[in-house]
């Protein structure tokens, strides 16, 4: 394929010859995004309401009600959790976010004003308040809406439009509701799109280490460096201990009904979404890839906390982990079909099952099942998917966005990543 | 074009002893096996749905079931060529819950609701 822009970011002249598929010109596509003070580039300019305990979640949702540009995230626990705070801060300072309102009840450990301070330190406008200090539900919602209007005006003033290319994109891939078509069509097509993104200088992240059962040697064979090989081996070993400890593997009734018989079978299909490029290393939740290329995200709790917190309790958690790593768009591959979206960054839904695509066309963005029917080659499908990604990056709403989906999920978990300020793992 | 009417199955790796249905096969239907190995035909012993697996060879009880060139499970009883390979005759080597799921719906049967 004519996707050899690895070093310069500029594709060879051969892709420009007339008469070939317009999709190959996708290598040169640019679009307008938002330049943030930290130098990162977003494809949306959303506002974010963050609640710091379940008790504040209703007010937070009411504040965002009827505000199409406003998404809601939060943490239900009264007792704070480093992992949860890191994840919320990573999302609150995500390149797709222009301003943040943090709302607390007033009793909880997690402090809204600390979140607002961290967001302001990133160069974005932010506000915070405690509901107990503003007279209950109705007055807090009214106050929150006032703050939101002010944040919106400041976010619009601050918005710096900037030209973006593939090298400015970080894309995540997650699969859920997998079936027998996922490993043959949906995931391999996403894998080939990932190859193209990496070749064009972008960053690609996939996760679900718990669905890499039996693939230790294969993972290590893909390592870009001895250090990456060491990280991949250690990540695999931790994951397997974890699955044995909780006696639960990442395979569900819908997977079985869709023809997948074992976690081993599901794993090989899931790994296909990682494409074929070298794996640069392993990042953990709320870390960002230190340089472009293909990365694996480890969301598994650490050894000494394994009995505390499930990894991948549902698809939304994994998707939010990918967005917290900086993904401006996440590709979600579902053979059985799904009706989720995601807060902060658009979700693009891909199915390898033509029947599912027909049943749920309003929710499915891309039918990779055409590869199985012989309608498209794998490469043609990947090129078409890249066009769709560029369209969504350019501002076109994905189907979940259009339907108003903005799911979010966060629960207690422990990963011993040092603070974001510390910069690197000990 | 109809995926449903395509009686073909894809063998991912030449060493695989199962192939994945690209459409739905009726009992007794001829199946065209496509993929990296030589093309062949087979008769489906029973109805097999899209995304599910058909045995390409006889697989003895206790023998590995191979797809993508890797062992995806162990045959829990002898499987004949053309048979549906799934939860009733193939089990994970790791997952303790494997073997407790409804063959058709995947519903777990190992958790009491009372």
Image (cartoon, rainbow, N blue to C red):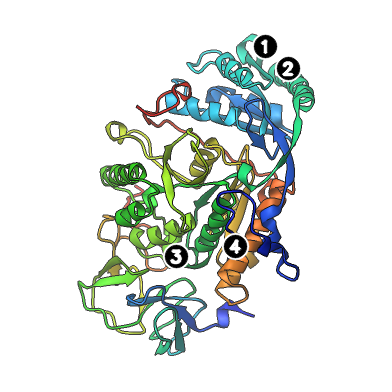
Residue indicated by mark 2: A143
Q: For label 2, count other residues whose C-alpha is less than 10 Å away and answer few (under 14), some (14-19) or many (20+).
A: some
Looking at the image, residue A284 lies above or below residue A6: above
Mark 2 and mark 1 lie on one chain; the one further toward the N terminus is: 1
Measure the alpha-carbon separation of dots 3 and 2: 49 Å
Q: For label 3, count other residues whose C-alpha is less than 10 Å away and answer few (under 14), some (14-19) or many (20+).
A: many
**Subunit bearing disc 4:** A
User: Residue at left 59%, top 15%?
Assistant: A117
User: Residue at left 72%, top 66%?
Assistant: A17
Measure the alpha-carbon separation of dots 3 and 4: 27 Å
**Subunit bearing disc 1:** A
- Work out whether residue B93 or residue A360 is closer to the camera in this orientation and state it: B93
**Subunit bearing disc 3:** A
- Do tags 4 and 2 sit on the same chain? yes
Mark 4 and mark 2 lie on one chain; the one further toward the N terminus is: 2
Measure the alpha-carbon separation of dots 1 and 3: 51 Å
């Amino acid at each position: 394929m004519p996707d050899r822009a690895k070093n310069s970011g500029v594709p060879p002249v051969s892709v420009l010859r007339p008469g070939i598929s317009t999709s190959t010109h996708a290598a040169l596509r640019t679009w307008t995004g938002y330049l943030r003070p930290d130098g990162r580039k977003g494809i949306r300019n959303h506002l974010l309401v963050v609640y710091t305990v379940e008790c504040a979640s209703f007010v937070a949702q009411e504040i965002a009600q009827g505000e199409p540009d406003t998404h809601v995230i939060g943490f239900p626990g009264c007792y704070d959790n480093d992992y949860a705070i890191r994840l919320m801060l990573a999302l609150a300072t995500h390149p797709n976010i222009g301003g943040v309102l943090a709302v607390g009840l007033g009793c909880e450990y997690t402090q809204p004003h600390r979140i607002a301070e961290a967001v302001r330190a990133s160069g974005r406008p932010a506000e915070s308040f405690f509901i107990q200090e503003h007279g209950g539900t109705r007055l807090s919602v009214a106050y929150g809406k006032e703050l939101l209007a002010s944040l919106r005006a400041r976010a619009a003033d601050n918005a710096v439009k900037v030209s973006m290319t593939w090298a400015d994109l970080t894309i995540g891939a997650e699969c859920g509701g997998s079936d027998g078509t996922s490993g043959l069509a949906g995931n391999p097509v996403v894998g080939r799109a990932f190859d193209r993104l990496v070749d064009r200088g972008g960053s690609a992240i996939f996760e679900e280490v718990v669905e890499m059962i039996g693939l230790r040697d294969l993972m290590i064979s893909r390592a870009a460096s001895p250090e990456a090989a060491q990280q991949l081996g250690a990540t695999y070993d931790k994951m397997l201990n974890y699955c044995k400890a909780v006696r639960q593997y990442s395979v569900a009734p819908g997977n079985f009904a869709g023809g997948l018989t074992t976690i081993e079978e599901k794993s090989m299909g899931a790994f296909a979404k990682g494409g074929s490029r070298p794996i640069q290393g392993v990042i953990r939740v709320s870390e960002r890839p230190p340089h472009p290329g293909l990365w694996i995200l480890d969301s598994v709790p650490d050894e000494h906390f394994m009995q505390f917190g499930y990894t991948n309790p549902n698809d939304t958690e994994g998707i939010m982990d990918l967005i917290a790593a900086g993904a401006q768009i996440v590709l979600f591959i579902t053979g059985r079909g799904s009706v989720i979206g995601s807060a902060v960054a658009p979700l693009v839904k891909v199915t390898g099952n033509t029947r599912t695509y027909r049943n749920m066309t309003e929710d499915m963005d891309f039918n990779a099942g055409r590869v199985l029917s012989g309608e498209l080659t794998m490469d043609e499908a990947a090129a078409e998917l890249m066009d769709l990604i560029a369209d969504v990056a350019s501002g076109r709403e994905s189907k979940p966005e259009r339907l108003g989906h903005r799911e979010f999920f966060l629960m207690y978990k422990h990963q011993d990543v040092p603070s974001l300020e510390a910069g690197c793992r000990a | 074009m109809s995926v449903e009417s395509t009686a073909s199955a894809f063998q991912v790796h030449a060493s695989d002893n199962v192939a994945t249905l690209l459409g739905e096969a009726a009992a007794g239907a001829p199946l065209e096996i496509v993929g990296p190995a030589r093309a062949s035909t087979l008769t489906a012993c029973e109805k097999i749905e899209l995304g599910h697996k058909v045995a390409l060879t006889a697989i003895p009880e206790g023998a590995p079931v191979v797809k993508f060139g890797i062992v995806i499970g162990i045959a829990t009883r002898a499987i004949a060529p053309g048979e549906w390979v799934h939860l009733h005759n193939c089990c994970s080597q790791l997952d303790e819950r494997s073997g407790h799921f409804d063959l058709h719906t995947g519903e777990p049967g190992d958790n009491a609701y009372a």
